[in-house]
Image (cartoon, rainbow, N blue to C red):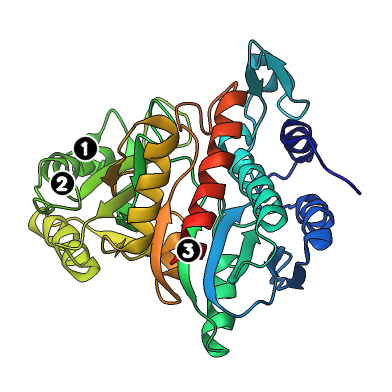
Amino acid sequence: MEFNNSLEFLKLLIKKKSITPDDCGCQDLIESFLKPLGFNRRVMNFNNVKNSLFSNKISGKSICFLGHTDVVPPGEIEKWNTDPFNPQIKNDILYGRGASDMKSSIVSFLFALKEFVHEVPNHNLNLNVALTSDEEGVAKFGIRKVTEVLLSEKINFDYCIVGEPTSENKVGDMIKIGRRGSLSGNLTIIGKRGHVAYPSQAINPIHTSSKFISDIINCKWDGGNDDFPPTSFQISNIHAGDGANNVIPEEINILFNFRYSPETTINELKEKVQEILKNHQIEYKIDWSHSGEPFYTKKGKLTEIISKSIQKYTNLYPTLSTIGGTSDGRFFKDISSEIVEFGVTNKTIHSINECVNVNDVTLLSKIYKEILIEINKH
């Protein structure tokens, strides 16, 4: 099958309802694009999650593009101006779920690869594309597992580009050279059920939780450092009671998350939370979930090449940042010497009417190709 138009290919990908962790045939479609370019596909599926590693098997400087084909659910479809899985272009803006996060980056890199191998047939790069359908979800059976396999086989890469939408206002104004770690807590504060008219006979866990919440949101965890913003704490959900307005609930459930810098450890965070709970003599139970440690790429050859390639096509020199959520780059830190995240703008990711400027897709592809050309020179 011949694919000559990047926007049409992007539409084909968006039409596939690859809501995490369902790949919905995206990686099969990508195989049909890469196979004629000399790429072999290795499938590494775990627990119904589809993972693929495409490689041209050439020895030499190795570079891997890391991406995900899964998308978040569209939300209330009636609030969309267009069908989220029937992409439409209006005034150079392409609308659809996954348009910016991150099917556009995948397509931009695929077409950059296509042009590069045609224009530089005797290149000496070991080219790889690693894809998963488990990035937007629990991320337990995607790149995390792929990394374990590659580590066991002593496979590594010199460079890795993660196609996350890192730009803020214009393509290339920001790239990510690391990310904070992520630690989540599922806290249950235990009280005693009773009638609201007889509060002395009950213990209201909602009232008890207010003391904990007040202390923890005013806690300064660290000051960050030159490369990382300070550790942040956010409550994402609170639930108590069964809806009755005359019953003091037995317990309250609080979900929270830390995005933590290298200046703080997960043990320090856990100990501080438990200290606050103990100080208020709160009966509780807590489950912790640690989805990734902070990772950081020292400013090296890949950062330099990407920055110069961006500057060539945009006259922008990118801000090097570590802000934002987690990415699959956190798993590749043990098998890639340098990891840089770079993609389109992130203004509409995960939102209603997610979209991408079609000119940005073309621009990103040009920059990706320039990066490959420059790596091939060194």
Pointer 1 local density, CA inside 10 Å: few below 14, some 14–19, many at least 20:
few
Q: Residue at x 27, y 38 (%)?
A: 206
- Viewer-nearest of discs 2 and 3: 3
Most foreground residue, 264 or 210: 264
Pointer 3 local density, CA inside 10 Å: few below 14, some 14–19, many at least 20:
few
Name which quarter of the figure residue 313 lies in: top left
Q: Earlier in the sequence, mark 2 or mark 3?
A: 2
Most foreground residue, 365 or 200: 365
The kind of residue on which mark 2 rests is Ile
- Viewer-nearest of discs 3 and 1: 3
Cα–Cα span, label 2 and label 3? 52 Å
The image shows a total of numbered marks equal to: 3
Pointer 2 local density, CA inside 10 Å: few below 14, some 14–19, many at least 20:
some
Q: Secondary structure at mark 3?
A: helix
* Percent coordinates x, y for residue 28 in the rendering: 82, 56
Name which quarter of the figure residue 312 lies in: top left
* Percent coordinates x, y for residue 57 in the rendering: 69, 77
Residue wearing tag 1 = 207
